Image (cartoon, rainbow, N blue to C red):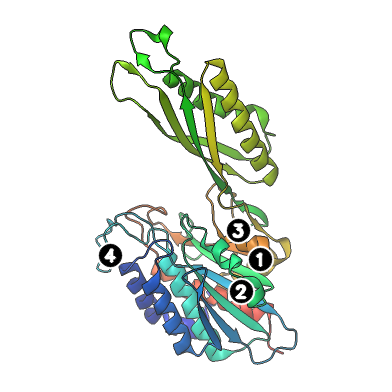
Amino acid sequence: MPIKNRLAEMHQEITAWRRDIHENPEILYDTHRTSALVAEKLKEFGCDDVVTGIGRTGVVGVIRGKSDTQGRVIGLRADMDALPMEEHTGLDYASKTPGAMHACGHDGHTAMLLGAAKYLSETRNFDGTVVVIFQPAEEGGNGADAMCKDGLMDRFGIQEVYAMHNVPGIPTGQFAIRSGPLLAAADEFDIHLEGRGGHAAKPHETIDTTVMLSQVIVALQTIVSRNADPVLQGVVSVTAVETSSNAFNVIPQSARLRGTVRTHSNELRDLIERRLTEVLQGVAATFGGSAKVNYTRGVPVTINAEEQTGYAEQAAIAVGGSCIEAPMVMGGEDFSFMLQERPGAFIVLGNGDSAGLHHPEYDFNDEIIPIGCSWFAEMVERRMPAA
């Protein structure tokens, strides 16, 4: 496997960074220790510019090549935040922070981009400028959006942007990518039903919200099965239900349902949002009750630009020897906000036979560190070859 020799030499050093970050996880925008570590390393590497506080706690490093005849600027992004969950790995470097764990491999992503930044700062064997982006709050905080709103793309003149994510279940070191939609838009809904509570022995005197919520759950499934074009992919899932009563003999006055909507096209996203409200109001009116919904749009669809996908694939083949087609999945990724601002691509790298992402026994596979570092570096040297 043609991993860059210098990055192979740095393997143990980068692994130590990764395990230090793993041991000290931070959630959402509270990545103060991690951000400080990243900024310190970038300055130590000799980056031409290091800027903190982009998107609250994001860090950006600028590395200029030996020449700049074309004025090309490429962004490379890694996420830094952990998840609010307990770790059950028993590792020597397991989380020391109760209720926080790097269960998605962001510690590995950060370490790999740091490794690439060190290599690129040493070699400068490219024509143009690299902007390394270390983002907070990928796990539900829309940190990529926050960095973009802070002027990330225009401030640093980024023209294309790329990112990588590990995936368990794909062979160790195997790259995968696809052009077009890859990950789904992830939206949330919070439904409130109002009826008329009363004694369970006298249902005729009530407007039963438990019956309403049952019908709503079933009816919402018809949006995908009967309103959506069958060739489009969408999921509507009710994930939490509660009522205003816990008593066995009380029909509750109100009820609440929460859930998520996942789609791979903006067309279907709009349709589901509209139909969800229409179906909900229709069911509530049928039973004589009322309903309100708070629909929140989360991350948009992650759409890889065709041209940039080709560049990412070529770099992956150069490093790993092959790059397979990635399947479309319903998980969400806030890198999609950056892809809305600039053309780019999101590639995945096999983590091997490990526990799944967001599992309490998950751990990033350190074997793939030099592979991921090499891909970041290859992207730069291949896309901006030295003049």
Residue 367 seen by the camera? yes
| Residue shown at 64% from the left, 71% from the top | 153
- Identify residue for label 4: 94
- Identify residue for label 1: 344
- Identify residue for label 2: 75
Mark 2 or 4, which is nearer the eye?
2
329 versus 368 height, above or below: above
What's the distance in space between the residues labelled 1 and 2, CA to CA?
9 Å
Amino acid type, mark 1: Gly
Amino acid type, mark 4: Ala
Crowd rating for badge 1 (residues with CA inside 10 Å; few <14, some 14–19, many 20+): many
Q: What element carries label 4?
A: loop
Amino acid type, mark 3: Ser
Query: Where residue 172 appears, x then y in whole percent?
Result: 46, 63
Q: Is mark 2 on a helix, strand or loop?
A: strand
- Identify residue for label 3: 336
Q: What element carries label 1?
A: strand
Query: Are circles 1 and 2 on residues that touch, CB within 8 Å?
Result: yes
Marks 3 and 2, the one that precedes in the sequence: 2
The quarter in which the C terminus is drawn is: bottom right
Residue 175 seen by the camera? no
Mark 4 or 3, which is nearer the eye?
3
In the visual, does 21 lie left or right of 155? left
Query: Are circles 4 and 3 on residues that touch, CB within 8 Å?
Result: no
What's the distance in space between the residues labelled 2 and 4, CA to CA?
31 Å
